[in-house]
Amino acid sequence: MIGIFDSGYGGLTVFKEIKKLLPDYSYIYLGDNLRTPYGGRSQEAVYEFTKEAASFLFNKGCHLIIIACNTASSEALRKLQQEWLPSEYPDRKILGVIRPLAEVAVLESKYKKIGVVGTKATIESESYNKELKAQDNDLNIYTNACPLLVPLVEEGWLKNVATRMVIKKCLRPLKDRNIDTLILGCTHYPLLMKEFKAIAGKRVKVLDAPLIVAEKLADYLKKHSEIETQLEKNKTIHYYTTDSSDKFNKLGSKFLGEEISSEKVELK
């Protein structure tokens, strides 16, 4: 099975594209909604929460996990891959969302001016800066934290005047720098794609993060048969949340565009 993990609902934007592109596999989606958002947490807390989530998914039979959370990808992924995974689950893999987006951004940017918006933790970690610079040191990278957007999305305020005002304020310093490419460095933000595109303007390429991650995953599975052959292909999907399953079912169904049923679990 393939596990998809996020601190809340944002990862559903990624999962929606993954299951559309790769429909034959079996999936488990886990949302740590009880402890969301991760954006204001310490690096130590994010690491522990992400490790607990990964343990849960591996114990449920997943051989591959996608951390569909930029904060967890920036604060916990590398340490999990380098220290925890080799000793605890040496035959399993964990992938994040930052590298796939950085790779595409470098290709898309004509004038080497890339903007990144995300949670406070993701921006302060400079994970995108490091990944982008590793691929092209001549890039000009401009970032801005937008901490208010995750709670607005979690409350379902997708088409709201207040939300548009927050996006405008968030993008203003990046537009002043004449960016030509924008990375939405939080998996919640694609739910506001129309608003981001409208406010960013036609000269700015706003990357479709969920689609990019899904395509990169498909490419990864083609290249790594040792992982792909271990994945269950029964087309089953299980949803788990650490908070109210009723709330998750209601909001999750809106984000996915289909009815879902989840089970509440406790991470340890």
Image (cartoon, rainbow, N blue to C red):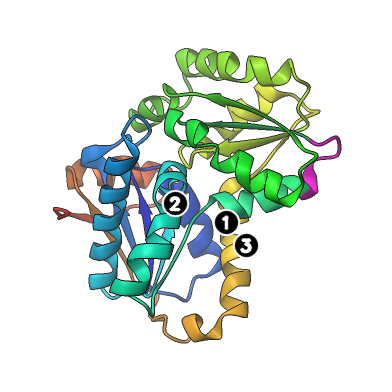
- What secondary structure characterizes most of the magenta part? loop
Q: Residue at x 42, y 49 (%)?
A: 12
Task: Look at mark 3 in the image and give the residue it sits on.
Answer: 215
Residues at badges 1 and 3 in contact (C-beta under 8 Å)? Answer: yes
Label 1 and label 3: CA atoms lie apart by 6 Å
Q: Quadrant of residue 178?
A: top right
Q: Quadrant of the N terminus?
A: bottom left
User: Which residue is located at x 44 percent, y 28 percent?
Assistant: 120
**Within the image, what quadrant is residue 77 found in?**
bottom left
Kindly state the secondary structure of the residue where label 3 is placed. helix
In the drawing, does residue 178 fall left or right of residue 172? Answer: right
User: From the viewer's perspective, is residue 22 above or below residue 156?
Assistant: below
Q: Is residue 34 above or below residue 77?
A: above
Residue kind at label 3, given as amino acid type = Glu
- C-beta proximity under 8 Å, tags 1 and 2: yes
How dense is the environment of label 1, judged by Cα within 10 Å: few (below 14), some, or many (20 and up)? many
Calculate the distance from the C-alpha at mark 3 to the C-alpha at mark 2. Answer: 14 Å
Return the residue at label 1: 213
Q: Which residues are magenta?
A: 107-112
**Image position of 60 (left or right of 122):** left
Secondary element type, mark 1? helix
Q: Give the mark nearest the N terminus, 3 or 2.
A: 2
Residue at x 47% of width, y 87% of height: 229
